[in-house]
Image: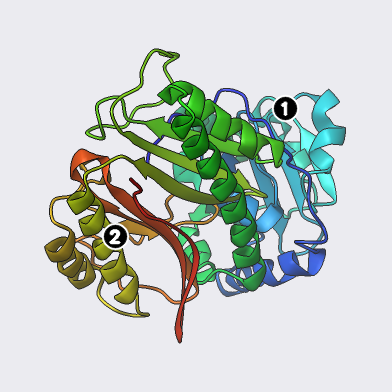
Amino acid sequence: MLTVHPSIMLGSYLWDEDRLPADEFEIRLQPLHAAMRDRSLCAMLVYGDAREHQALAYFSNFIPRMRWAMALFPEHGAPRLLASMSSRDIPAMRTMTWLPEVKSGWEWKWFDEFAQGLEAPGAIGTVDFHLMTAPLYAQVEKTIADRFSLVGCDDVVAGARTRQRPREIAIIRSATDVVSVAASEISARWRAGADIERAALAGERAARSLAAQDVRTLVSRDGGCTLEPYAARFEDRPARLLAYVAVKHLGYWSESFVSLGAPSDERRRASEGLDALIDGLVAEASSAQLARRVAETAGPQHGAFVNSFGHRIGLSLSEGGDISPQSQEPLVAGRTYALRVGGRNGAVASAMVVLKGDGREILLRSDPQP
C-alpha cells in the first residue's frame, strides 16, 4: 500500500546489537565481497534516503531520518558511512550502525576524505543509485571523473536478498506484534464511539509507545470505497470502518487492515478468499495462477489493491513479488508476504505470512468483523 511519507521520522533507531550482532552483517556482506573479486571492483557504494533505504539498511543497519546516506564497502579496509547531516549529529548517527567510521556532509564534496585509501584508477560498484536525485548524481560523476568508473551492481543485492535471514524474520515477528496492538487500538476506539481520525491516531500512538520507527495509516470516509491519509477531519464517522495500518520496527515493516461493519456475505467472501490465498501459498507456485484462483473465490477486489492480492514485505513496505494475474514471478520460500483480500463495502481480510519450503507460518491474520 502506498501511503504518505512523514516529514519527521520518530522512533528508536539505535542498533540493537542483541537482535542483529556484528556477525550478522559479516554474513550479509559476503556477496558484496564476492562480487568485488569477480568484477575487479575496488569498493561497493550503497545509497539510500529517507524514503527508500532497504539495501543500505540491510548492509549497514543505518536508516536515514532525513535526506540521504551512502555506505562505502572497500575490498580491503574498514567500511564507512557518509550521511547528509550536520557534524553535531555524528554521535547520534554512530549509535545507528555497526560501521566503525561515520562522516557527515551536506554535499558529495566530502568524497576525497570519504574514499581515502581507494587506489585510482579503479571501478566502484553502485547499489540503488537509481534512487539518487539528478543534482547529487551529477556531483558524484564530477567528483570521481578520471579516477573511478561506476558499475551498477543492483543485481548482486537482489541475489543476496532472495531469502530473508532467520534474524530478519524474527524482527518481522516483533513488528507484527506492534502492528497488531495498533490495529486492536483502532478497533477498540472505533467501537467506543470515536470518529475515524481519532481512532487511527490512537492506533498510531499505541505503536509509537512501543518504539515503532514509523507508522502509516489510511482510513475510509465513504464506507470502504476509498482509502485516504490523515486529513484532520474529526467529524467523520461513516457507517462502517475500513482502516489500514503499517508499522516499521527495527527497520522492518508489518501491516494489517481493520474492517468493521461490512455486510455478512461480503465478510464471508473476504475470509474465504484469504483462506484460498493462504492455502495456495506454496514455494515456487505461480503467483499469476494463484491470483486468478483467489479472484474466482473472492470476487471483485478493492480498487486500492490494483488487482493485487499481496507482495513481499520486509525492509520496504513492498519488496516486489506481487501476487497478481499479471505476475511473472513464482512464490519464494524464505520470504514474508503481506496478503489482503476484499472489495465491496469495506470487507477486507489480511494476513502476514512467512512462506517456508515445507509450509507456512501465519504471523498475523485479521478478518472483517461485524
**Residue type (three-letter) at the residue carrying disc 2:** Ser
Q: Which residue is mark 2?
A: 271
Instruction: Tell me which residue sits at (77%, 64%) in the image.
Output: 76
The quarter holding residue 96 reads top right
Determine whether, in the image, residue 99 is placed left or right of residue 309. Answer: right
Residue 75 vertical position relative to residue 146 in the rendered view, above or below: below
Disc number lying in front (2 or 1): 2
Q: Quadrant of the C terminus?
A: top left
- The kind of secondary structure element at disc 2 is helix
**Residue type (three-letter) at the residue carrying disc 1:** Met
Residue 104 vertical position relative to residue 306 in the rendered view, above or below: above
Residue 153 in view, yes or no: yes
| Upstream in sequence: badge 2 or badge 1 | 1
Determine whether, in the image, residue 258 is placed left or right of residue 142. Answer: left
Badge 1: few (under 14), some or many (20 or more) residues near its Cα, within 10 Å?
Answer: many
Which residue is farthest bottom? 358
Q: Which residue is mark 1?
A: 85
Colouring scheme applied when the structure was drawn:
rainbow
Q: How many marks?
A: 2
Determine whether, in the image, residue 204 is placed left or right of residue 233. Answer: right
- Residue 211 position, x and y percent, is 71, 40
- Residue 212 position, x and y percent, is 65, 41
- Residue 347 position, x and y percent, is 27, 46
Badge 2: few (under 14), some or many (20 or more) residues near its Cα, within 10 Å?
Answer: many
